[in-house]
Image: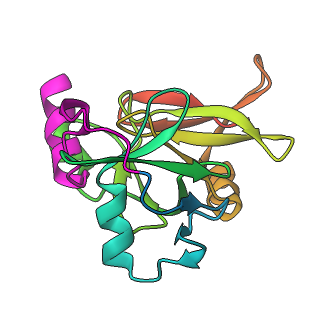
């Protein structure tokens, strides 16, 4: 199953630079910020060009304490209000059966990048503004909060397990707790 899952992930995943290999010093150039809606800002001005925001996202990482934009030449700190990305849409993978799965949920983040919900990119519950909401684990230590409209749509297709009093979402052969 793993090889098939790897092939599915490769089909959807957007390339990310190998930031773990880069150890440049902190640049101190500019003030990067991502607000709770996933909008990017530099020096207080919103970055409205989606390709530029995607480029920055391709070199963004989280080390467990801080978010960083990392290149071979410099490393810049990024302040993040909540999560750097927000899952704003989703669809069922139209060719899940070809990879050996009954269904696979494909999430789309606010930058238009796709993420299959699976063991590698799993759902987990975390706090957001005092409420427990689902988040999607991404690569490079990053995560994305699930937008409320997506959560409501998932509740409609989730399985309620009476014995555990929980809502479960099934994707790529795994089940994930929604609430």
Q: Position of residue 68 (x, y in %)?
A: 42, 44
Residue 33 is drawn in which quadrant? bottom right
Looking at this rendering, what residue extends furthest in the bottom direction? Answer: 48
Judge by depth and name the residue closer to the eye, 175 or 102: 175
Residue 13 shown in magenta: yes
Judge by depth and name the residue closer to the eye, 71 or 86: 71
**Which stretch is magenta?**
1-27
Q: Position of residue 34 (x, y in %)?
A: 57, 60
Quarter occupied by the N terminus:
top left
Quarter occupied by the C terminus:
top right
Q: Is residue 147 above or below residue 64?
A: below
Looking at this rendering, what residue extends furthest in the right direction? Answer: 130
Judge by depth and name the residue closer to the eye, 72 or 157: 72
Q: Image check: 64 left or right of 2?
A: right
At 18% across and 31% down in the image, what residue appears?
Answer: 21
The answer to whether one can see residue 1 in this image is no
At 61% across and 59% down in the image, what residue appears?
Answer: 150
Residue 61 shown in magenta: no
Residue 112 is drawn in which quadrant? bottom left
């Amino acid at each position: 199953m793993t090889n098939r899952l790897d092939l599915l992930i490769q089909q959807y995943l957007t390339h990310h630079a190998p930031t773990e290999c880069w150890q440049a010093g902190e640049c101190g150039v500019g003030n990067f910020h991502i607000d709770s809606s996933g909008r990017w800002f530099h020096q207080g001005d919103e970055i409205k060009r989606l390709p530029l925001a995607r480029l920055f996202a391709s070199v963004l990482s989280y080390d467990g304490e801080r978010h960083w934009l990392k290149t071979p030449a410099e490393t810049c700190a990024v302040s993040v209000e909540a999560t750097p990305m927000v899952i704003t849409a989703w669809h069922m993978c139209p060719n899940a059966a070809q990879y050996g799965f009954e269904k696979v949920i494909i999430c789309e983040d606010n930058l238009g990048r796709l993420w299959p919900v699976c063991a590698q990119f799993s759902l987990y519950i975390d706090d957001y503004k005092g409420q427990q909401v689902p988040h999607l684990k991404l690569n490079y230590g990053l995560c994305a909060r699930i937008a409320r409209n997506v959560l409501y749509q998932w509740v409609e297709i989730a399985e309620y397990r009476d014995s555990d009093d929980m809502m479960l979402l099934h994707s790529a052969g795994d089940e994930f707790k929604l609430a």
